[in-house]
């Protein structure tokens, strides 16, 4: 079997090698003045992941950090627009985000991801793509009732009416993190308080410096 046929059958390229960049992560981190990590925000739809991730992003940016937010809806407009919401598609969605986030780490950037990412196994797979300490799981904890109250898109109502299939929290499970690096109660704590909790933890972990 020739290489082209083999690649077609396996779905993987076989004639590729990894090229080392002329400027590495360490040099970029030194220039930026902070470590590059993945801040992985996870929680139910309506738990405040995107809002919190962007608020933390704004605060870090104001301190001169190199940052970027990967938002679930935005990613599905492009990189993952071919994926649905079946378990297998959710798994592939998170795999792609994990790989993309890994590249951002090499670029010396603090990457903030805001995805439901409901399954522990998928989040663990994303964690295992990078070195220890590079993946910081942030659980945005808010009970289902509060998330439904915040649902401006009416997604929960549609899910309960059977109009949306495999909707996390209604017809598809959400597996809460067992031991996240950071947990914030986005149902009870205000946005500014949640931001401060996260920033303080990043300082304690040596990711950013204390101004």
Image (cartoon, rainbow, N blue to C red):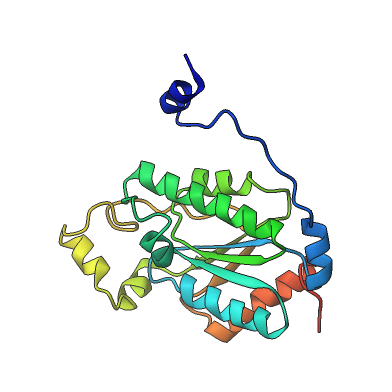
Look at 43% across and 50% down and name the residue there. Answer: 93
The residue nearer to you, when weighing 39 against 74, is: 74
Q: Is residue 144 above or below residue 165?
A: below
Residue 194 visible in this rendered orientation of the protein: no
Out of 106 and 58, give the one closest to the viewer: 106
Q: Is residue 84 visible?
A: yes
Q: Report the side of 28 relative to 10 (left or right).
A: right
Q: As rendered, which of 157 and 134 lies closer to the eye?
A: 134
Q: For the image shown, how many numbered marks are present on the structure?
A: 0
56 horizontally vs 96: left or right:
right
Dividing the picture into quadrants, the one containing residue 24 is bottom right
Q: Residue at x 21, y 68 (%)?
A: 157
In front: 80, or 203? Answer: 80
In the rendered image, residue 11, in percent from the top left (x then y), is placed at: 45, 31
Residue at the far top in the pictured view: 1
The quadrant the C terminus occupies is bottom right
* 17 left or right of 9 in image: right
Q: Residue at x 56, y 43 (%)?
A: 125
- Residue 146 x, y percent position in the rendering: 37, 74
Q: Position of residue 104 (x, y in %)?
A: 64, 60
Please determine whether, in this image, residue 1 is positioned above or below residue 28. above
Spot occupied by residue 162 in the image (x, y as percentages of width and height):
16, 57
Toward which corner of the image does residue 116 lie, by quadrant?
bottom left
């Amino acid at each position: 079997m020739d290489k082209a046929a083999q690649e077609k059958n396996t779905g993987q390229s076989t004639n590729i090698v990894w090229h080392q960049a002329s400027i590495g992560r360490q040099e970029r981190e030194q220039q930026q003045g902070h470590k590059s990590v993945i801040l992985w925000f996870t929680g139910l739809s309506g738990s405040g992941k995107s809002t919190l991730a962007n608020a933390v992003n704004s605060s870090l940016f104001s301190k001169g950090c190199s940052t970027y937010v990967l938002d679930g809806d935005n990613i599905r407009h492009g990189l993952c627009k071919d994926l649905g919401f079946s378990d297998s598609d959710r798994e592939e969605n998170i795999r792609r985000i994990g790989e993309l986030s890994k590249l951002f780490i090499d670029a010396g950037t603090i990457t903030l991801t805001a995805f439901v990412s409901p399954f522990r196994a998928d989040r663990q797979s994303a964690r295992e793509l990078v070195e220890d300490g590079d993946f910081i799981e942030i659980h945005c904890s808010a009970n289902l009732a509060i998330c439904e109250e915040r649902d401006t898109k009416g997604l929960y109502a549609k899910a309960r009416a059977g109009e949306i299939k495999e909707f996390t929290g209604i017809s598809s499970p959400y597996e809460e993190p067992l031991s996240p690096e950071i947990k914030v109660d986005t149902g009870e704590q205000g946005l500014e308080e949640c931001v401060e909790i996260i920033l303080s933890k990043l300082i304690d972990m040596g990711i950013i410096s204390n101004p």
